[in-house]
Image (spheres, helix red, strand yellow):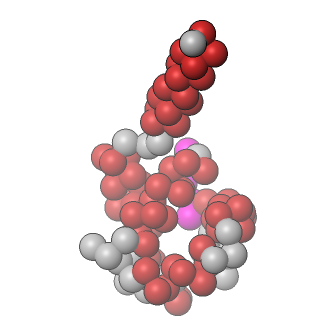
Amino acid sequence: MRLLVVFFLTLVACVAFALNDAPQPQRVKRIYDSYCYVCHGTGWQGAPMSGNPSDWQPRVEKGWDVVLKNTQAGINGMPAKGTCEECSDADFRAVIEMMMSEQ
């Protein structure tokens, strides 16, 4: 029984940690509006479009490590970090997940 309680508390702590690490929706929207919209909202220079999952699918199929590495370093016409120096990998992933959803 004690082992079950320890397991449950560990699980709760992991979930709480994961939730605290995820950026708040207002932050995700602010980052998108400030740094991402100009290209991903318009498709400028071939950027994958927000709200068009098929634009994102080939990128995500390569794995999130590759997507985040490309975001950090920049790719094609996209500057490193999309110029968002304050953004974390968790921020980038949340914004990309938002852009991948049909809006």
70 displayed left or right of 17: right
Against 54, residue 32 (above or below) is above
17 displayed left or right of 61: left
Image quarter of residue 100: bottom left
The C terminus lies in which quarter of the figure?
A: bottom left
Please give the name of the residue rendered at 68% of the width and 69% of the height, measured from the top-left corner.
Answer: 63
- As for residue 17 lying within the magenta part, the answer is no
- Residue lying at the far left in this picture: please name it: 103
Residue 73: tell me if it is visible.
yes
- As for residue 85 lying within the magenta part, the answer is yes
30 displayed left or right of 6: left
The N terminus lies in which quarter of the figure?
A: top right
Please give the name of the residue rendered at 35% of the width and 61% of the height, measured from the top-left corner.
Answer: 33
Location of residue 42 in the rendering, given as x and y in whole percent from the top left corner: 38, 83
Please give the name of the residue rendered at 45% of the width and 36% of the height, measured from the top-left corner.
Answer: 19
- Residue lying at the far bottom in this picture: please name it: 46
Q: Main secondary structure of the magenta part?
A: loop
- Residue lying at the far front in this picture: please name it: 1
Location of residue 52 in the rendering, given as x and y in whole percent from the top left corner: 39, 83
- Residue lying at the far top in this picture: please name it: 2
Q: What residue span does the magenta drawing correspond to?
A: 82-86
Location of residue 84 in the rendering, given as x and y in whole percent from the top left corner: 54, 54
Against 101, residue 20 (above or below) is above
